[in-house]
Amino acid sequence: MEASLADWLRDRQRSMLRQMVKLVSKPGILSLAGGLPEPELFPTEQLAAAYAKALATDPRALQYGGTSERLKEQIVELASRRGIRARPEEVVLTTGAQQGIDIAVRSLLEQGGTVLLDEMSYTGIHQTAAPRTPEWLETPVDLEHGSDAEAARELLDQRKLEQRAAPDLAYLIPDGHNPLGVSVSEERRQAWAELLARHQVPLIEDDPYGLVWFEQEFAAPFKARIPEWTLYLSSFSKILAPGLRLGFMLVPEALAERIGVVKESGDLECSGLTQRAVSTVLEGDFLDDHLNHVRGVYAQRRDALLEALDRHLTPFATWTRPRGGMFSWLELNADLGIESVPLLERSLEQEQVAFLPGIAFSLPGSGAADRAKRSMRLSFSTLSPELFDGAVAAIARQVEQLATRHR
Ligand SMILES: Cc1ncc(COP(=O)(O)O)c(C=O)c1O
């Protein structure tokens, strides 16, 4: 049936990320590769009780049933923790933030339209936009301040000068960026907000890590700055558990019904049983204590990773110092001439240590390909703190050996 596949799919390689994840998920591997939350943090007891209660009290928990009004109110309350003032009418439930990206892309992107995004970004945006064969406009990123608003301004102003249409959408991850682990600085957030509003470019703001901050709350997201231009996405995956497959969008109220139709066309609705269970878990004080615990555990692991990087890789590379989320991004110095794919092969073979090569997060033909090729994403979410030193020392050993060969 190969020849019958739609053009965009026939020509498509399997996602490099998926191939890599498969390669590095073998037992016995010390892995900084996976992007998964720590399963020990899943509130299994609370969820077990909440699911049991939903099933015991009302068989309609298993019926088709639309959206729980109570859960929408609770989501509005959750969003207020990010400084967002929303109304229940603006909430669209999704099967995770990933479905939110898909719904937002299908709602905004024309066939052959234009997507503005970071030069290294979460691959979910690449996958969901691909069927529309878009033109990609890449914004440079740096490891301290995040997505470069000034470069985006030049791009958009130039397009306007050439009388070309503004992009159909922009996609940004304001905090705990996957894969970069960076947060967009306050100055750049403000500049981006003004730029998008001025050029009337709708923003998909992907914020699944917004409540996973460590020392200090993250700055206000775009939804709190330019709500009328923002489709905001978040999820319970990183704060409760990804297996719930429950997330949400906050959209301008005038669009909510039509965006709801896009959701419906995909999978009708989110599981009513899970909606009830999550709603029960969100009642009371549990979430506050739970979030504090989650932040504490990840912050400790982040510290262990950064200490190990400082100790073993200082002469060879630079990396992000994440203020939240689950990832750091490391770039090997260009003059070493080392690429991260062969480095991964050696690390796996000789050290049983894994990470994800940066190239997995850039588009084919990206202007940032050279940089991505000497980069890696390091996840600190699932290793216990005492394992980081050995894992990073092993990578450093392989870097040193390759560096000696290149000299
Ligand atoms: C930036 C980003 N967006 C979306 C997702 C998808 O999350 P969900 O489980 O909510 O679909 C992830 C998951 O890793 C992510 O890192």
Image (cartoon, grey):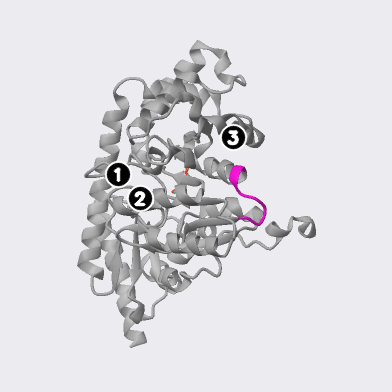
The residue wearing badge 3 is 259
The residue wearing badge 2 is 189
Residue 219, numbered circle: 1
Q: Write the start and end of the magenta stretch as one range.
A: 107-113
Look at the picture and state if 93 lies above or below 157: above
The C terminus: image quadrant: bottom left
Q: Which residue is rendered at x = 49% and y = 11% of the image?
A: 57
Decide which of 27, 372 is in the foreground and name it.
372
Q: Are marks 1 and 2 in contact (CB under 8 Å)?
A: yes
Residue type, numbered disc 2:
Arg
Q: Which residue is rendered at x = 39% and y = 64% of the image?
A: 376
User: SS of the residue at dot 3?
Assistant: helix
Residue 353 is at least partly visible in this image: no
Q: CA distance from mark 1 to mark 3?
A: 27 Å
Q: Is mark 2 within 8 Å of ligand 1?
A: no
Q: Is mark 1 within 8 Å of ligand 1?
A: no
Decide which of 149, 292 is in the foreground and name it.
149
Q: Are marks 1 and 3 in contact (CB under 8 Å)?
A: no
* Mark 1 / mark 2, whichever is N-terminal: 2
Point out residue 398 in the picture as x, y percentages from the top left corner.
Answer: 34, 74
Q: Which residue is rendered at x = 48% and y = 21% of the image?
A: 276
